[in-house]
Amino acid sequence: MKVLVLGGAGYIGSHICKALALLNHESVVVDNLSTGHREAVRWSRFIEADILDSTALIDILQNEGPFDLIMHFCAKSLVGESVQNPAIYYRNNVAGTLNLLDAMVATKHERLVFSSTAAVFGMPEKDLIDEQHTRLPINPYGQSKKIIEDVLSDYHHAYGIKSVALRYFNACGADPDGEVGERHEPETHLIPNILKSATAGKSSELKVFGDNYPTPDGTCIRDYIHVNDLALAHILAGEYLQENDGAFAFNLGNGNGFSVLQVIEAARDVIKQDIVFSIEPPRAGDPPILVADSTKAKQILGWQPTYKDIESIIATAWTWHQNEKF
Ligand SMILES: NC(=O)c1ccc[n+]([C@@H]2O[C@H](COP(=O)([O-])OP(=O)(O)OC[C@H]3O[C@@H](n4cnc5c(N)ncnc54)[C@H](O)[C@@H]3O)[C@@H](O)[C@H]2O)c1
Ligand SMILES: O=c1ccn([C@@H]2O[C@H](COP(=O)(O)OP(=O)(O)O[C@H]3O[C@H](CO)[C@H](O)[C@H](O)[C@H]3O)[C@@H](O)[C@H]2O)c(=O)[nH]1
């Protein structure tokens, strides 16, 4: 396949580019480097551009294409920031994606894999969240992704755009070879913050947000899924779109929940260092438990996560963290 990877300089996109290259697929990355890193684009041709620029998008699709598949990772994705400043979330995530979809229609590109999120579900009603679960986002970030899921359905009906929305639960881990990894500025995710606190000592003491949730140890439970398992799901989704016509959605997680304290404990075992933390007030907008039921992705895409235990996931993040290349 020849694949256009929008947002391929970011954390998840860069891992997908490596996975594509290993399978001999060709990729072109488009990224405005707002949160991504030029050094993370190692397996693709790179074009610096913004998806808010419709002319640039049409130009790229016409002059670099045709593409068999478009993968779209570009987004602002900080929940707290989205509550403070929803305008940039609706502009970047909604208007930017509409630009892309219109450019696809104009240039006759018809297959898209879209990064959605567990945040489309809002407060979970069940322990395991499958695709039938009500989508009721509780913040503008989740809302921006839900809007695009709905737009994808309408664009399929009206313009024939075929799409898969992949709803990641907690993406984590890194390339086991240490060539790319997670670097967000600021870093808000739990596992990199644990590892940073282990190496930075007091200067970056880990904060645990809330210990009074209705969970066995009082801290939030999440479903941690390795970034390379997500990469595999994208490739399977692309193949699925070669054969199937529709606007599909799949939940992607391991199906196991770990509390914040369990993740810290597992990290202690992996890195063999003590991890000092303080208990802080809960972070706004954090649901107590989010765990995926990924039966649909397993049955329909033939997806099977390979990183099953939290220790092996943390070990890959630790390899990256000890020798970060950018
Ligand atoms: N990290 C997670 O746990 C997680 C979970 C669920 C969903 N997601 C979604 O997955 C996608 C990738 O997440 P990530 O963690 O790799 O984020 P990231 O910030 O590392 O990557 C996003 C990339 O998109 C680029 N970008 C953003 N806006 C752009 C624009 N207007 N034009 C061009 N490039 C633009 C950024 O520079 C960056 O390289 C996002 O859509 C996010 O909402 C992430
Ligand atoms: O320094 C930290 C960082 C996180 N946490 C806690 O650890 C858990 C996981 O937090 P993350 O920030 O790592 O992940 P989230 O579950 O908040 O968010 C992830 O899942 C969301 C869906 O609900 C979105 O998709 C988002 O982009 C994605 O990063 C939460 O309970 C959070 O409060 C801490 O205690 N301390």
Image (tube, rainbow, N blue to C red):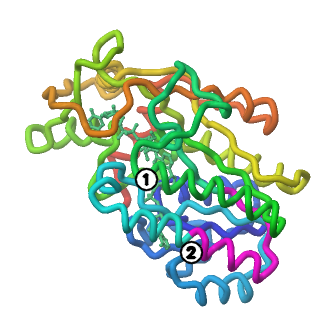
Residue 320: in magenta span: no
Reading the image, the residue beneath label 1 is: 141
Q: Position of residue 228 (x, y in %)?
A: 59, 43
Q: Is mark 1 within 8 Å of ligand 2?
A: yes
In the image, residue 77 above or below residue 89: above
SS at badge 1? helix
Pick the residue in front: 266 or 234.
234
Would residue 305 be found to the left or right of residue 210 on screen? right
Q: Residue at x 66, y 89 (%)?
A: 59
How many C-alpha atoms fall within 10 Å of the one at disc 2: few (<14), some, or many (≥20)?
A: many
- Residue 100 sits in quarter: bottom right
In the image, the segment drawn in magenta is 97-113
Q: CA distance from mark 1 to mark 2?
A: 22 Å
Q: Amino acid at mark 1?
A: Tyr
Q: Residue at x 58, y 68 (%)?
A: 97
How many C-alpha atoms fall within 10 Å of the one at disc 1: few (<14), some, or many (≥20)?
A: many
Q: Amino acid at mark 2?
A: Val
Q: Is mark 2 within 8 Å of ligand 1?
A: yes
Q: Position of residue 118 (x, y in %)?
A: 52, 39
Split into 4 quadrants, where in the image is the N terminus? bottom right
Reading the image, the residue beneath label 2 is: 30
> Which of the four quarters of the rendered structure image does ligand 2 lie in?
top left
Split into 4 quadrants, where in the image is the C terminus? bottom left
In the image, residue 45 above or below residue 167: below
Q: Position of residue 188 (x, y in %)?
A: 30, 46
Would residue 313 be found to the left or right of residue 286 on screen? right
